[in-house]
Amino acid sequence: MTQDELKAAVAKAAFDYVARIIDDHSGEFILGVGTGSTANLFIAELEKIKHSISATVASSEESARRLKELGIPVIDLNAAGVLRVYVDGADESNEYLQLIKGGGAALTREKIIAAASEEFVCIADESKLVPYLGTFPLPVEVIPMARSHVARQLVKLGGDPVYREGVITDNGNVILDVHNLKIDEPRKLEAAINQIVGVVANGLFAARAADLLLLSTHNGVKTLTAKG
Ligand code: 5RP
């Protein structure tokens, strides 16, 4: 199977998972929807059940556009309350379902939606499951005027920040991708980076990890919960 086929298989598995939740759910159902190539395949699947979804909350303008194109309503998170479930991809996951996200520059909205959801279902192909986080450079969203200051602080934390040229986030900010970080304690590093003035959010999802990882492998889609 190619990586695209693995992504398509996990998108279908996530669709089945959400369809089962909707079947058991009474009343209005608002779904959190993430960003990226795996999330895009999940969005395409949603067309089949669009009449059962009251609305969605999207983690990026791009995902919102795709949802609207399919005739699926997109609302502001402030109008949605607590979401029953949020489905999104990741750049890396460890066995505790702590993640690195933000390869698509949507990390801040992704973090907000994950925080506002009862259940966060991560969808990924098997290449994303790693023993230690940090091979994928950690994205950090930064207020533009603070870019150099934040970069200097990230160097003090042991990383090599690289400005993601030409990228402005949906929130009007910039991204620093931090290479060569030794992420032994993801929660501590997440908190330490959040303390830097000028940082909006960082792509470590450790304090609020995923609840479930649907992992697409060559032997089918596996359902993983956090170890321990
Ligand atoms: C976007 C993200 C994505 O979930 C992450 O980059 C994975 O993307 P893909 O499914 O294309 O591999 O965090 O900000």
Image (tube, helix red, strand yellow):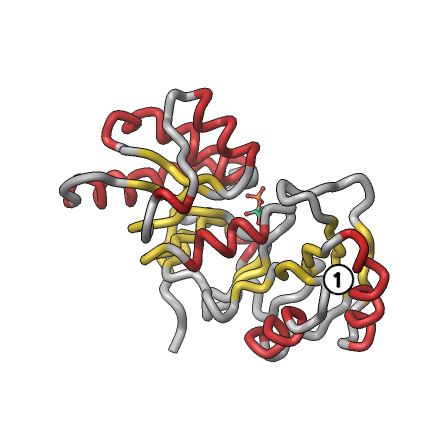
- Which amino acid type is marked by label 1? Val
Question: Where is mark 1, residue-wise?
Answer: 178
State the image quarter where residue 222 is shown.
Answer: bottom left
Q: Relative to 167, is 138 above or below? A: below
Q: Is residue 143 left or right of residue 12?
A: right
Viewer can see residue 62: yes
| Residue lying at 22% horizontally and 45% vertically, measured from the top left | 21
In the image shown, does 205 or 115 lie closer to the viewer?
A: 115
Q: Relative to 22, is 108 above or below? A: below
Q: Relative to 70, is 163 above or below? A: below
| Residue lying at 81% horizontally and 55% vertically, measured from the top left | 145
Q: Is residue 101 left or right of residue 12?
A: right
- Count of picture labels: 1
Please state the horizontal and vertical placement of residue 77, each as a whole percent of the image.
Answer: 41, 45
Disc 1 secondary structure class: strand
Please state the horizontal and vertical placement of residue 46, each as a whole percent of the image.
Answer: 35, 30
